[in-house]
Amino acid sequence: MRIVTSDEMKQIEQSSLDFGLSFHRLMENAGSAASAFIKRTFKVIERNCTIFCGKGNNGGDGFVVARKLAESEVNAIVILLDGAPSGGEALAMYKQLESMGVPIYEFEQVKDKLGGWLAQTDLVVDAICGTGFKGQLRDAHRQAAALINSCTSAVVSLDLPTGVECDSERVDQGAVRADFTLAFDSFKPCHILPRTLPFCGTVERVEIGIPDQARRQVDPRFGILSLQQIFELIPPRPADSHKGTFGRVLCIAGSARYRGAAALCTMAALRCGAGVVTLASTEPVCACVAARVPEATLIPLASNDFGTINAPNSISTILNALEQADCVALGCGLENTPNTFQLVEQVLKHAECPIVLDADGINTLAENIHLLEQVKSPLILTPHPGEMARLCGVSTGEIQQNREGFALSFAIEHGVYLLLKGAQTLIAGPDGKLLRIGSGNSGLAKGGSGDLLTGMIASLIGQGLSPRDATGCGAFLHGIAAGRTALRRSQTAMLPSEVLEDLAGIFLEQGR
């Protein structure tokens, strides 16, 4: 999914001029694409269609739609909200439409009749306000939106519904509620954000002839990583390095029931290149991990009757360990108990290095979201859809219907980096940027896969990558390695621990 902001779309359109396009041609293409969608989606031949047009470029697109529909024997009428355009491509499109004899009316002159007209209309096209809209609708626009919302016919908005801001979740209280929104060339943030998506209805992206070369001139806030980009971000290891060169990672993980989670997280951090990886956990968990991962250093802690870390007896030891860490991985296999809450609270409050929070660390946070107000270092959350639902107070189904929107909203609101797991892993940042990770397969849908990912991300942060880059690189490598494991073992039979062998192969191929 290609997602661009209003300003980025303008840059793309401007760049397209270097490839033989013009603004006139782009408007013609947009209106033609919209009319083609309407004709193949609705039975509009010899039916009535009402097109509401502003005087800007969105209105110009609407004039083209009206012309194309009229040429196809659709009974089209146009309602002008702000009079005829005063110049530019929109005026040219208006004059072309006017010369065809298509009925054109001023809103103020016919608004008392519009309710009756709309009762006889089979389709409404909303082309009043475009991506430049901000703030509040003018009275006439709000009145027109109310009439559109009250009619029973289908409503198609061009690029975005009138009254919805392109790049935010701000919506005027009288905004149009479309059945379909046609996103020209690229999706916009309002097409995915949870508060604006309901106003958009079904969003369909339509091509308007912009070449890929024009898009490459713009660095969008929303992106997709490639293997080449990954190893541009992960530097080669210097020949004169030592273990301190590659960072110190502290893993706070594991319990009596989930000893493997601690082992997988710790082992993944080492496999991904960290110089020193320390596990802080109960003595039985440390003994288990020592047998599996002799390279790890250990901080044995007291346990309670539930087989989890005894927080009151362990906090001071953990806080001391935090002072030496370059990154901390917190939550894998801890179980959701009052002791876990105390651990999460103290680490979030005192850590001065980045924190990767997973599993029961996230579940604890969901019940105590106020803890985010105490965090003073970068925080990366790695929820699966169920954990994300608990964080947001909605159902898992709602999360899956609008993954991008929920991830972005949470990251922006709480100032965190959020990796939302799934078939298409998403990484949202506090600055509103979104990464999509295309690697991975259903073989990762097994317990332990998330523990690997947490350790990998923490390892890359410990080696000096930024939280965003480390999260993106870790997720991408996690998926690519899993793809190779599936080829060896099958998606059904593969195990998370086997993924690390294929991760090693990838590093070897890249000279790392």
Image (spheres, helix red, strand yellow):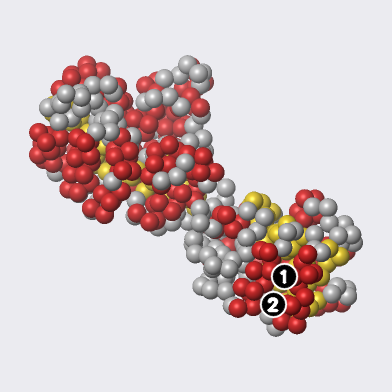
**Nearest to the observer: residue 45 or residue 245:** 45
Q: Quadrant of residue 394?
A: top left
**Nearest to the observer: residue 39 or residue 196:** 196
Q: Tell me the amino acid under the disc marked 1.
A: Phe
Q: Position of residue 208 (x, y in %)?
A: 70, 58
**Nearest to the observer: residue 284 or residue 325:** 284
Q: Tell me the amino acid under the disc marked 2.
A: Leu
Number of callouts: 2
The disc placed on residue 52 is: 1
Q: Position of residue 373 (x, y in %)?
A: 26, 54
Kindly identify which residue carries mark 2.
Answer: 81
Please report the residue visible at 51 percent of the width from the left and 21 percent of the height from the top.
491
Please report the residue visible at 80 percent of the width from the left and 69 percent of the height from the top.
117
**Nearest to the observer: residue 12 or residue 431:** 431
Q: Secondary structure at mark 1?
A: strand
Q: Position of residue 122 (x, y in %)?
A: 80, 59
Kindly report the distance in space between the C-alpha atoms of the residues bearing marks 1 and 2: 7 Å
Locate the C terminus and report the quarter of the image it occupies. Answer: top left
| Mark 1 surroundings: few (<14), some (14-19) or many (≥20) residues within 10 A | many
